[in-house]
Image (cartoon, rainbow, N blue to C red):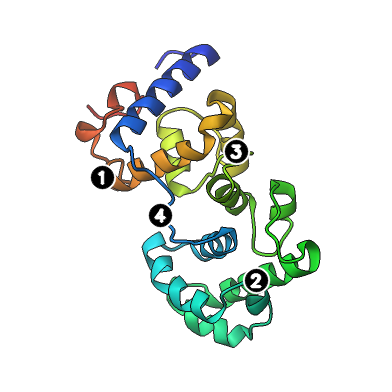
Amino acid sequence: MPRESKKARRERAAEVYDLLAEEYPDAHCELTFANPFQLAVATILSAQTTDVRVNMVTPALFERYPDVETLAGARQEDVEEIVRSTGFYRNKAKNIIGFARGLMAEHGGEIPRTIAELSALPGVGRKTANVVLGNAFDINEGVVVDTHIKRLATLLRFTKEKTPTKIEQDLMEIFPSERWTMLAHLLIWHGRRVCDARKPRCEACVVSHLCPSSRV
C-alpha cells in the first residue's frame, strides 16, 4: 500500500466508521450493569475472559455486595469464591475490593469522572477508566484499546504501534472525540462477528475494500 497522508487516513477512517455503524446499529457495551460502580467492577473482572462469563458471575456478586460500601467491607475469600470462574480470581477479588476501598477513602464512594482519578484506583487501568467514562457518563476522554481493537486497528493500518497507550493516541488523532466510545464498540463487535483472529471472514466484511490487510 502506498504511503497514506494523514488527511487520507482520516477520510478512510471516517468511511470505515460509517460503514461499521450501519452494519452494527445496536453496538453497545456487552457487559451487564445497572450503575457506574457495577460497570467498573465488571470491567475489572473482564480481563482475560469473556463478557459472557463476567455476566454469569456479576448477578450473584452484586446481590451479595450491592454497593461500594459493602464490597469495601468484603472478605477476600468470599469474593474469590464468587468470581472464581472468571480466571485469575485471587487477583481479581483483591482488585475489586481494593477498588471499592479506594473509592470510599478517596472519593466518598462516588465514581470519579476523569481518567487520571479513575486510573489511580486499585485494579483500574486506562482501558477500564475509558470503558466507565464512555459508557456510564458519556465522557469521551480516550479510546478503549482491548485485544480486538488492537488487532483491527493494526489490520486497518490505523496504527503501527504495539502498546495500548500509543495505539490509543493514534486512534484519537484520526477519529473525532465524539466517536471515541462508539468506535470501540464497533471494532469489538466487528472483531467478534466477522474479523475473527484465527479465520477472518474478509468476504463478508463491509470494510474489506478499505482494509489494506483484506484477503479479497
Whichever of labels 3 and 4 marks the residue nearer the N terminus, that label is 4
Position in image of residue 198 (x %, y %): 29, 48
Evaluate if marks 1 and 4 touch, with contact meaning CB atoms under 8 Å apart: no
| Residue, disc 4 | 30
- Please name whichever residue, 197 or 91, is drawn nearer the observer in this view of the structure: 91
| Residue, disc 3 | 140
Amino acid under label 4? Glu
- Mark 1 Cα-neighbour bin, 10 Å: few <14, some 14–19, many ≥20: few
| Residue, disc 1 | 199
Amino acid under label 1? Lys
Lateral position of residue 8 relative to residue 165, left or right: left
Which of label 2 and label 3 is nearer to you?
2
Whichever of labels 1 and 4 marks the residue nearer the N terminus, that label is 4
Q: Which residue is farthest left?
A: 203
Lateral position of residue 204 relative to residue 27, left or right: left
Q: CA distance from mark 2 to mark 3?
A: 24 Å
Q: CA distance from mark 1 to mark 2?
A: 42 Å
Amino acid under label 2? Val
Question: Regarding mark 3 in the picture, which secondary structure is present there?
Answer: loop
Whichever of labels 2 and 3 marks the residue nearer the N terminus, that label is 2
Q: CA distance from mark 3 to mark 1?
A: 32 Å
